[in-house]
Image: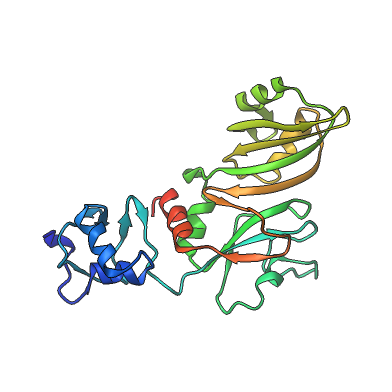
């Protein structure tokens, strides 16, 4: 038994895992026996281990297990014309109105400018919000970008190498042309930059003004078929993958 994680006053580990939605107690026992579960960084193989679900940090197959049922993280497809604040003193539409029926005190993770649509996360987990927003964790974001004019593949190489802006070099991690006509292009980019209006500024700098911008992914979380103005609560697996991505 891994003595340093055993809490004699705690709850059996397989019961904690089952309560977190990882399957029946028996299947959770199998996870432990197979060496797929760690508690506070220590692999646990014994079925008798008890843990404090309020303080234990548990991972299964390297993915963090969310034990606190009061924690909630929500995906919103932010419509165009909505500002990324919970309340706007000027009375403009804000993201807070889409979660006004929630009792939790929610924080928005990062921002999208008013003209940009797409995925934004809201959570009552302050630590998760801070880590997702902090540049040191380099959480990638994916955007679909409608541009004026026909782009060429050479543009991708230029953007991956980097474009000098007034506040420093800006790079994209991946670039893909989705569709082009003589008048317009649709491209998908991935980057881990968080500077204000960074996507629009990059394409302005290279001579392709943005006409429409949609964020489709943050880390492992995808917008999918979520309609503008609609929200969905992330699953425990999705939240676990986010927590793992930022080292929680």
Q: Residue at x 28, y 63 (%)?
A: 27
Q: Residue at x 13, y 59 (%)?
A: 2
The quadrant where residue 98 appears: bottom right
* Front-most of residues 44 and 88: 44
Residue 43 on image: x %, y %: 21, 53
Left or right, 1 with respect to 59, comes to: left
Percent across and percent down for residue 154 are 70, 20
Quarter of the picture containing the N terminus is: bottom left
Residue 24 seen in this snapshot: yes
- Figure check: 180 above or below 76: above
Give left or right: position of 156 versus 11. right
- Residue farthest right in this picture: 183
Image position, residue 9 (x, y; %): 18, 77
Whether residue 170 appears in this view of the structure is no
Instruction: Give the quadrant of residue 152.
Output: top right
Q: Determine whether 186 is above or below 95 in the image.
A: above
**Which picture quadrant has residue 149?**
top right
Residue 175 lies, in percent from the top left, at 64, 31
């Amino acid at each position: 038994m891994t003595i340093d994680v055993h809490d004699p006053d705690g709850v059996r580990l397989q019961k904690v895992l089952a309560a977190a939605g990882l399957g029946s107690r028996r299947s959770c026992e199998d996870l432990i026996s197979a060496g797929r579960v760690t508690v506070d960084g220590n692999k646990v193989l014994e079925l008798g281990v008890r843990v404090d679900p309020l303080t234990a940090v548990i991972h299964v197959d390297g993915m963090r297990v969310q034990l606190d049922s009061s924690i909630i993280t929500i995906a919103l497809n932010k419509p165009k014309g909505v500002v990324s604040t919970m309340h706007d003193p000027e009375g403009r539409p804000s993201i807070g109105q889409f979660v006004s029926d929630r009792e939790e005190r929610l924080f928005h993770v990062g921002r999208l400018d008013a003209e940009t649509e797409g995925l934004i996360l809201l959570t009552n987990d302050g630590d998760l919000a801070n880590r997702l927003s902090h540049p040191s964790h380099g959480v990638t974001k994916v955007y679909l970008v409608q541009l004026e004019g026909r782009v060429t593949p050479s543009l991708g190489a230029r953007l991956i190498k980097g474009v000098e802006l007034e506040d420093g070099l800006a790079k994209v991690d991946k670039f893909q042309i989705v569709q082009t006509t003589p008048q317009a292009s649709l491209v998908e980019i991935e980057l881990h930059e968080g500077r204000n209006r960074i996507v629009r500024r990059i394409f302005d700098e290279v001579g392709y003004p943005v006409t429409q911008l949609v964020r489709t992914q943050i880390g492992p979380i995808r917008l999918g078929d979520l309609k503008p103005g609609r929200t969905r609560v992330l699953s425990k697996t999705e939240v676990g993958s986010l927590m793992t991505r930022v080292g929680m």
